[in-house]
Image (cartoon, coloured by chain):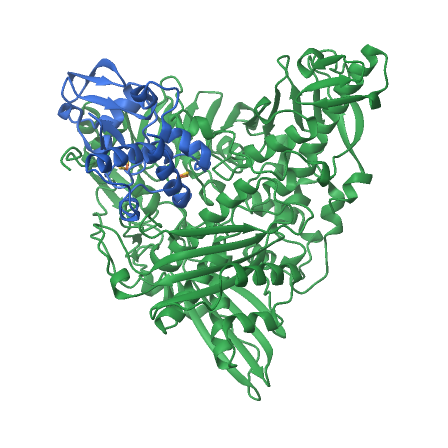
Chain colours: A green, B blue
Amino acid sequence: MAEDLRRRRFLAYLLAAPTLAVAVQWIDPQRADAAVPTLPQPEEIFDLGDLQNLAAAPTANLVSVQVNRDGSVAFAVPRAEVGQGITTAVAMMVAEEMDLPLDKVTVTLADARPELLMNQLTGGSNSVRSIYTPVRTAAAVARQRLVATAAKQWGVKDSELTTRDGVISHASGRTATYASLAVAAASSKVEAATVQLKSTSDFTVLGTPQNRIDAREAVMGRKTFGMDMQVPNAKPTMVRRPPTINGTVRSVNNKAAVLAMPGVTDVAVVSRGVAVRADTFGQCIDGLRALDVSWGPGTVDGESDETVLAKLKAAELPMLVPGLLTEVLDAEFTFAFASNSPLEPDNAIADVRKDSAEIWSSLKVPIVAQENIAAQLGLPIGAVKVHVAQGGGSFGRHLFHDVAAEAAEISQKVGKPVKLMWSRTDDFRQGRTHPMCTSRIRVTHALGNVISYEQRHTSVQTEFSHGLGEMLTSFAAKLPIAGNLSFAESIFLLTQSSPYNFGVTTQLLNEIPLKFNTGSMRNIYSPNVVTAQELVVDRLAAKMGKDPVSMRRSFLRDNRLKAVFEKAVTEGQWGRALPQGVAQGIAVHAEYQAAVCCLVEIDCRPETVDRPVTDGVTGPRVTKALIVVDPGFAINPRGLEAQMIGGMNDGIAMALTSSLHMRDGIPLEGSWDNYFYTRQWNTPLDMRVVIAPSGGTPSGAGELAVAPSMAAVACAYARATGTAPTYFPINHGTLGFEPYPTEPSTPPSPVNGLDS
Amino acid sequence: MSSHTFVLNGERVTVEVADDVRLLWVLRDLLGVTGPKYGCGLNVCKSCTSHINGKAFNPCSVPVSAIKADDEITTIEGLPATVGQELHPMQEAWLEQDVAQCGYCQPGQIMTAVALVHRVRAEGRAITDADLDQIRNICRCGTYSRIRTAIRSGAAKM
Ligand code: FES
Ligand code: FES
């Protein structure tokens, strides 16, 4: 694939601008079209990322590389940066094709731009894949234009000139910096230009490990997140929330008293609670706690883990293969609700005026936010400006703009700018969740062959952002999926495929329409689906008298998967001697056009499981973790490694410790000592990532490691303890904390912070 | 409203605010010092970690009235000045290991790390895995292993 690029020319446009600016078509439509297959397992060839690429195709020449008078180059990426490293990857693409030092490239986040349509969506790990060719094309045309400008000035041929570190040179010794040519190279009219891109073998920046371009700002405490932005008079604002999910306000019984509290400026009833605006967030907390509110019912009052599970079981789709003449293996797994809450809580600034509005928030689909907020405020779309803020994590949360819409509602109500923050407890209890689900599997086998593999995934319905929904609807005809599937079913098919030669394979999704606030969490269905699958593969291996490795070796289909698998087996020393209670687990996964294998070792000995940590869940410890990944082409190996490490810690949390306990219409979790995301005392002491690229185009990376990590940990746990877990995370059955009361909705901050 | 004075990153500051407002909000909302982050307001996540007289503490859980006039508060913004450098060696180590992903937790992680090194030094010993296991700071991006490596290498340069 990469080699084709050498011969092909790519199209960009010189823009009429004061300094050189090159705009580019946002995607190479050839690739997406060519990728439409007609296979029963659509994910392998046409996945969610391809869908997003395809949807991005029709919008042309709208994003541009700009050469500034000081020789620096700017690019506004229409994507969200939430820690996945997209800005660094884009800067590397520009630096590569322009022959420019990386620190001369600035990448900012573009405001909502309705004309980009669905192009402006960050999710499904497609960002890097969809911009790889367009960004490089724009940069290459810019370089070509600078060279042509110098050649003309000096009366020499373009081909006699070379570029390096932002300087153009001629054999005669003449040199010119990009800075000196930025104005001269500018075009006075829009003009098409084509260019060849560098071949992979000529890369000096792409494919080399680079540090994040925002690292220095981050470690100095200067990186400005949404929470850190200052907009004049946008005072701290929080919301007193109902005691059950989506509860409603009946009445506020002491508004005047709260308005009289120190620092409080406004109190207003809004759709999801009662807003308090004050001089400091601390005073918002005091104010919202003092409110006396009568609440109406929510949307899932009375629902708890047990009632939801019963509804899921009742909705499970039947298996088709009876298994009368063969041996049958039946398995069923349950996965608890989980939270995609990032460390930076949901927040947004809104300044709503009579005939205009301005919003700042970390948004992955800013265009949809803009459209919906305009409609909500009764303003034309053009009157609403939406800025994308840097996000302190997302994990799926920022696909939705709930907090931005709420900030707009409050600002409109109080007639003043507001800086809205959800408390940590709000984030866990009223924020979006990864829904509870079950996965049933039936495998039939005979004479050493697997005859059929059926997986029935049943979930509380997952809401997808409007962006994805509209994208899918408008491109439905081009999708390699037949029939009238629901949106969620389509996403399921686009993201799932079995990597094994297991005969007749069907993987189906059914959803139940309970009104929880749900959303996709990092890697959507895959962690649950793959964990169920890999546990069954291990059980099947035992039944067929094989070990987990020889079993997978016999049945893996894909060559790239086989390669990462074999590498993990060797590098991770599969089968090495381990004490009783310690065991290895291995799992594979292919998604986002990449292949991954994880091999972990888990220590389930009592002295480890019971090691004391105050207010923390200990339990089994993953002591060693190895991830072997084939990303196609690794744009930034150091960034890819970081994403793998993060994904591993997510997988460990999902397998062992992190879940929401739903009780009477609301999660019990209210802080990080209740929701046990992986902590230092849970993280592997020995964490290794091996990058084994097979060539080709870069794959998605942000979510890739979560599913195989979770699955490998589950398999290792089953082998170490001799008991196959069926409910995840494995500690869900014990509540390891005293829940905060549901009223008031945000607990008070302690006052003993100096006592320790 | 009352007046509160303390030393913030080497400079004496005075703010007018109610006694019980937690220091985190005085720093962030009134003084515009946004390095210390809110991640819970419950003394749990540790993303607000700063130093008081060289010791790690969590300003989300300390009323401003508990701070005395001569108390020296150091936030991430003031850390380099404590060693008279543009960057503290621990920040350098963070850059070398490319620790940050979204970066939101990292000011707190670095402040925790520096205080840990000082504490362990005062006890006359080297950092152990057990010390690192006791760090409570959440990193929701899961950068834990790079944090461990960075702390060890930063400690060597402190
Ligand atoms: S915000 Fe201070 S510990 Fe979480
Ligand atoms: S880097 Fe994102 S929370 Fe730690």
Residue, far front = B124
Instruction: Answer left or right for A25 relative to A216.
Output: right
Q: Quadrant of the C terminus of chain B?
A: top left
Q: Nearer the viewer, residue B37 or A378?
A: B37
Q: How far across and down, in percent of the image, does residue B102 sit?
A: 44, 36
Residue drawn at the location 74% of the way across and 47% of the way down: A1
Which residue is found at the position 48% from the left and 29% from the top? A214
Residue A434 versus residue B118 in the image, above or below: below
The x, y position of residue A526, in whole percent, is 51, 58
Q: How many marks?
A: 0
Query: Does A551 appear above or below A25?
Result: below
Between A673 and A208, the residue placed more toward the observer is: A208
| Rendered position, B28 above or below A654 | above
For image coordinates 46% across by 33% down, the residue present is B96
x, y percent for residue A704:
53, 51
Q: Where does the N terminus of chain B fall, quadrant-wise?
A: top left
Percent coordinates x, y for residue A176 in the rendering? 72, 13
Q: Is residue A461 visible?
A: no
Instruction: Determine which quarter of the picture holds residue A102.
Output: top right
Image quadrant where residue A617 sits: bottom left
Quadrant of the displayed image that contains ligand 1: top left
Q: Name the one closer to the observer, A566 or B35.
A: A566
- Residue A85 shows up from this direction: yes
Q: Is residue A219 above or below residue A161?
A: below
